[in-house]
Amino acid sequence: MESVDVLYHYAWLVPVLPLLGAAIVGTGLISYSQTTSKLRQPAAIFIVSLTGAAMVLSFFNFLEPGAGAFYLHANV
């Protein structure tokens, strides 16, 4: 049950990671408007990476044995 507590401890990162990435990239693209065309690919990679990390964290939170819907169905 300890691993479930660790996952729930980091569950707040699921919405924060994409939001943080969008804020950083948005601020950077507004601040450096002349170099926007050069920064589009690195910015896209950065945002997709943070969104993917949030997705992996949310999958671990959902699929962890003893947590989520599987735990509720097992005890009913």
Image: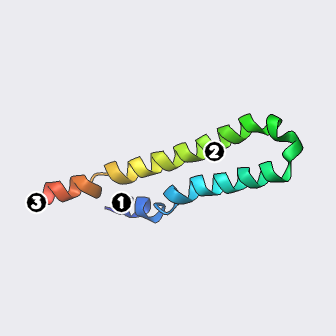
In the picture provided, is 60 more to the left or to the right than 33? left
What is the three-letter code of the residue carrying label 3? Val
From this view, report whether residue 1 is shown above or below residue 70. below
Q: Secondary structure at mark 3?
A: loop
From this view, report whether residue 14 is shown above or below residue 59. below
In the picture provided, is 31 more to the left or to the right than 66? right
The residue tagged 3 is 76
Q: Secondary structure at mark 2?
A: helix
The C terminus is located in which quarter?
Answer: bottom left
Look at 79% across and 39% down and name the residue there: 39
The residue tagged 1 is 4
Q: Are marks 1 and 2 in contact (CB under 8 Å)?
A: no
Q: Position of residue 64 (x, y in %)?
A: 33, 51
Q: Are marks 2 and 3 in contact (CB under 8 Å)?
A: no
Q: Secondary structure at mark 1?
A: helix
What is the three-letter code of the residue carrying label 2? Ile
The N terminus is located in which quarter?
Answer: bottom left
Q: Can you see residue 2?
A: yes
Q: Position of residue 52 (x, y in %)?
A: 53, 43
Tell us which disc is closer to us: 3 or 1. Answer: 3
The residue tagged 2 is 47
